[in-house]
Amino acid sequence: MTGRKALWSAIGMGAAYLMRNKSARDKVISQVRRVATSMRDKKSGNSSNTTNNNY
């Protein structure tokens, strides 16, 4: 139970920090969008990292 309380405390402190610090909040939002986009591309089979070599 102590670990769970520590986890929720860390989440609450992180949320409070992000609410007060706009640059950190913008950075986290951009990273989440980047991950979501890469996951969506991976799921649909569209990856910008692969090249189509027809030899």
Image (tube, rainbow, N blue to C red):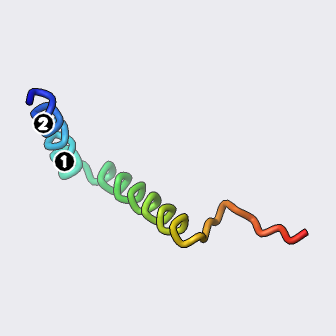
> Are the residues flagged by discs 1 and 2 in contact, CB closer than 8 Å?
no
In this rendering, would 28 be left or right of 17? right
Task: Give the residue at x 60% y 71%.
Answer: 46
Look at the image and tell me in which quarter the N terminus lies.
top left
Residue 44, horizontal then vertical, whole percent: 54, 72
> In terms of image quadrants, where is residue 22?
bottom left
Residue at the spot x=32%, y=48% of the render? 24
Q: Residue at x 46, y 60 (%)?
A: 34
Judged from this view, the residue extending furthest toward the top is 2
Front one among 23 and 55? 55
Q: Is residue 54 or residue 10 the one in the foreground?
A: 54
Q: Earlier in the sequence, mark 1 or mark 2?
A: 2
Residue at screen point 43% across, 63% down: 36
Instruction: Report the mark closest to the observer, 1 or 2.
Output: 2
State left or right for residue 33 relative to residue 46.
left
Q: CA distance from mark 1 to mark 2?
A: 10 Å
Q: Is residue 46 above or below residue 35?
A: below
**What kind of residue is marked 1?**
Ala
Residue 26 horizontal/vertical position (percent): 34, 57
Task: Name the residue carrying label 1.
Answer: 15
Tell me the quarter of the picture where residue 11 sits: top left
Q: Give the vertical position of 20 relative to 32 (above or below).
A: above
Q: Image height check: is 3 above or below 27?
A: above
Placement of the C terminus among the 4 image quadrants? bottom right
Tell me how many marks there are: 2
Residue type of the residue flagged with mark 2: Ser
Q: Look at mark 2 in the image and give the residue it sits on.
A: 9
